[in-house]
C-alpha cells in the first residue's frame, strides 16, 4: 500500500539508470529442497541491451566451454537502479530471465500503482506447489493466494483512500506462498520469483503442504474474543478435519500449529502442546469445559452439513 495518489514517476532518461546483471546457480547434484543458491554479479551496465548481450555470451560460454561445470544455471536477473536519488529510493525494476536467457517476468517498484490481475492471467493457480527463490535458498511452497483481482483492487482502493489515504501498489501484486504445518512463516512473492519445481518433492512435504492448505480453506467456525481470549492462538472447528478424526473435537490453532482436543475427554489427541503458550492452553481448556455443550452442538451441525 502506498500513501500518495500518484507515487511513481518513471525514469525517462536512460543516462540516469544502471543495470546490475547477476547469475544464479545451484549444485546439479541437489536432489531435494531446500537448495542453496549462489548469486554472482556479471557486471553493471549503462544500457539494458548490453546487459542482455553479456547474459547471452555467458550462456554460450557455459555451453561451449562448460564454464559452470560444477554449477547449474537457475536464472538471471537484471536489476535497474536510478543513480540520481538516494539508495533507498533507487530501485526501478528487476527483470528475471530463465536459464536460456528468455525474459521470465518483471518485478516493479513497490510505489508503482497496481490495478489488479485476473486469475486467468496468473501463471500459477491456487493450491499449486511451486518452487520459489527467497534470499539465498530455493524451496517449495503452495500457492495460498493470488494477486488481487481488478475488482478487489477497485474496492480496496476506495476503502483505503477514504480511511487512510492509501492505494494498492506493486507490493500487492504478489502471491501468498504457504510453507506448511511446521513452519512459522509464509512469503509474499512476485510472480517472477516463482517457478515450476525442477527437483523431486518428498511425499511427506507434498502431503504437509496440501493438508495445511485444505485445513485453512475449511475453517467452519472461529470462536471470537467474546468466547476466547488468547495471546497467540484461537479456537476453531474445521470441516476438513472430519475426514481425519470422526470423534467430536475442537481445534486450538496457532499460526502454523494446531492441537486437536477431544470434546469427550478434554484431552489432546493430535499436535504438540509445547508449541503453544502455556497460559493460553490452561485458559482455553477451562473454556472448552465450560462451553462443552455448545461445542458438541456446533460439531454436530458441522458434521451434518458435511455429509
Image (cartoon, rainbow, N blue to C red):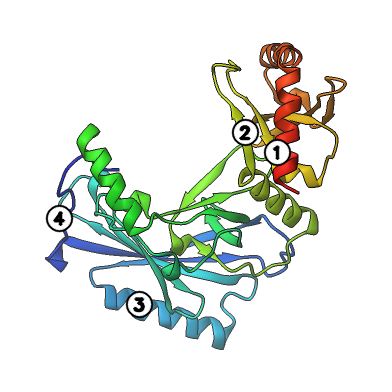
Where in the figure is residue 283, as x and y percent of width and height? 68, 11
Toward the bottom, the furthest residue is 64
**For the residue labelled by badge 3, is the local secondary structure a helix, a strand or a loop?**
helix
Q: Residues within 10 Å of mark 4 (few under 14, many from 20)?
A: few
**For the residue labelled by badge 1, is the local secondary structure a helix, a strand or a loop?**
helix
Look at the picture and state if 90 lies above or below 71. Answer: above
The numbered dot on residue 9 is 4
Q: Earlier in the sequence, mark 3 or mark 2?
A: 3
Can residue 138 be seen here? The reply is no
**For the residue labelled by badge 4, is the local secondary structure a helix, a strand or a loop?**
loop
Residue under pointer 3: 52
Discs 1, 4 touching: Cβ within 8 Å? no
Discs 4, 3 touching: Cβ within 8 Å? no
Residue under pointer 2: 221
- Inter-mark Cα distance, 1 to 4: 52 Å
Q: Earlier in the sequence, mark 1 or mark 4?
A: 4
Identify which residue, 17 or 193, lies in the foreground: 193
Which residue shows up at 29% across the image and 54% down it?
A: 109
Toward the right, the furthest residue is 265
Discs 1, 2 touching: Cβ within 8 Å? yes
Where in the figure is residue 152, as x and y percent of width and height? 35, 52
Discs 1, 3 touching: Cβ within 8 Å? no
Q: Earlier in the sequence, mark 1 or mark 3?
A: 3
Q: Earlier in the sequence, mark 1 or mark 2?
A: 2
Identify which residue, 289 or 101, lies in the foreground: 289
Discs 3, 2 touching: Cβ within 8 Å? no
Q: Earlier in the sequence, mark 4 or mark 3?
A: 4
Q: Earlier in the sequence, mark 4 or mark 2?
A: 4
Look at the picture and state if 300 lies above or below 99. Answer: above
- Inter-mark Cα distance, 4 to 2: 46 Å
Amino acid at each position: 500500500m502506498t500513501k500518495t495518489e500518484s507515487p511513481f514517476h518513471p525514469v525517462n532518461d536512460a543516462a540516469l539508470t544502471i543495470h546490475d546483471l547477476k547469475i544464479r546457480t545451484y549444485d546439479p547434484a541437489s536432489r531435494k529442497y531446500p537448495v542453496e543458491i549462489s548469486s554472482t554479479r556479471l557486471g553493471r551496465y549503462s544500457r539494458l541491451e548490453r546487459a542482455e548481450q553479456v547474459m547471452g555470451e555467458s550462456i554460450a560460454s557455459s555451453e561451449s566451454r562448460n564454464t559452470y561445470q560444477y554449477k547449474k544455471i537457475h536464472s538471471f536477473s537484471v536489476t535497474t537502479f536510478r543513480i540520481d536519488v538516494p539508495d533507498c529510493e533507487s530501485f526501478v525494476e528487476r527483470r528475471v530471465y530463465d536459464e536460456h536467457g528468455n525474459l521470465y517476468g518483471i518485478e516493479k517498484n513497490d510505489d508503482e500503482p497496481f490495478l489488479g490481475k485476473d486469475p486467468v492471467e496468473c501463471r500459477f493457480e491456487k493450491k499449486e506447489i511451486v518452487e520459489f527463490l527467497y534470499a539465498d535458498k530455493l524451496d517449495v511452497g503452495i500457492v495460498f493466494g493470488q494477486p488481487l483481482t481488478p475488482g478487489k483492487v477497485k474496492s480496496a482502493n476506495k476503502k483505503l483512500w477514504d480511511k487512510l489515504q492509501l492505494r494498492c501498489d506493486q507490493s500487492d501484486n504478489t502471491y501468498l506462498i504457504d510453507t506448511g504445518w511446521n513452519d512459522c512463516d509464509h512469503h509474499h512473492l512476485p510472480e517472477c520469483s516463482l517457478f515450476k519445481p525442477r527437483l523431486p518433492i518428498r511425499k511427506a512435504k507434498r502431503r504437509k503442504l496440501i493438508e495445511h492448505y485444505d485445513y485453512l480453506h475449511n475453517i467452519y467456525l472461529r470462536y471470537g474474543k467474546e468466547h476466547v481470549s488468547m495471546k497467540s492462538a484461537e479456537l476453531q472447528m474445521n470441516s476438513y478435519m472430519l475426514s481425519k478424526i470422526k470423534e467430536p473435537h475442537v481445534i486450538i490453532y496457532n499460526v502454523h500449529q494446531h492441537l486437536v482436543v477431544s470434546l469427550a475427554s478434554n484431552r489432546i489427541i493430535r499436535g504438540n502442546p509445547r508449541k503453544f503458550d502455556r497460559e493460553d492452553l490452561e485458559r482455553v481448556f477451562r473454556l472448552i469445559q465450560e462451553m462443552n455443550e455448545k461445542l458438541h452442538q456446533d460439531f454436530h451441525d458441522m458434521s451434518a452439513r458435511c455429509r
